[in-house]
């Protein structure tokens, strides 16, 4: 199963250059990296990144993240994937830009 992480442009640049990331400021404050399923990620974009240009979408294979991945309740008790380890470039299956068109982020086909 693929799960997803949204990064702002500067976060992506730093992550791509370093090969790993402790996540966004929110991730670091919460102590884990916030991830989403294919069904959740458009709502995540709308809720936390509304109108933000220059976003990147990263796809990760959930099974390859091992014990560092936990499924925990969030938004109304729905389970979300949380990564209790740095995000590593080696774990990213693919990336895509999320263009902002008419105020909406345009997603590639998701699994």
Image (tube, rainbow, N blue to C red):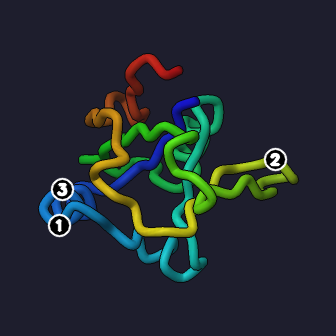
Residue 75 placement (x, y as % from top left): 77, 54
Q: Position of residue 20 (x, y in %)?
A: 29, 64
Q: Circle 2 sits on which residue?
A: 78
Residue at left offset 43%, top offset 33%? 104
Tell me the crowding category of disc 1: few under 14, some 14 to 19, or many 20 or more residues within 10 angstroms, Cα based: few
Q: Is the residue under label 1 in contact with that under label 2 (CB below 8 Å)?
A: no
Asked if the residue under mark 3 is in contact with the one under mark 1, i.e. CB atoms within 8 Å, the reply is yes
Quadrant in which the N terminus appears: top right
Name the side, left or right, on which 61 lies relative to 108: right
Number of residues whose C-alpha sits closer than 10 Å to that of mark 3, classed few (under 14), some (14–19) or many (20 or more) = few
Identify the mark nearer the N-term, 3 or 2.
Answer: 3
Q: Which residue is mark 3?
A: 16
N-terminal of the pair, mark 2 or mark 1, is 1
Instruction: Please give the label number shown on residue 5.
Output: none
Along the line of sight, the residue nearer the viewer: 101 or 32: 32
Residue 78 in the image: x percent, y percent?
Answer: 81, 47
């Amino acid at each position: 199963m693929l799960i997803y992480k949204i990064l702002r442009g500067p976060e992506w640049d730093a992550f791509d250059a370093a090969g790993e990331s402790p996540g966004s400021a929110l991730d670091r404050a919460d102590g884990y990296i916030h991830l989403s399923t294919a069904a959740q990620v458009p709502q995540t974009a709308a809720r936390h990144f509304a109108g933000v240009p220059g976003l990147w979408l990263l796809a990760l294979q959930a099974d390859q993240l091992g014990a560092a991945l936990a499924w925990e309740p969030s938004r109304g008790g729905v389970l979300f994937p949380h990564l209790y380890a740095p995000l590593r470039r080696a774990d990213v299956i693919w990336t895509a830009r999320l263009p902002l068109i008419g105020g909406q982020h345009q997603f590639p086909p998701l699994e």
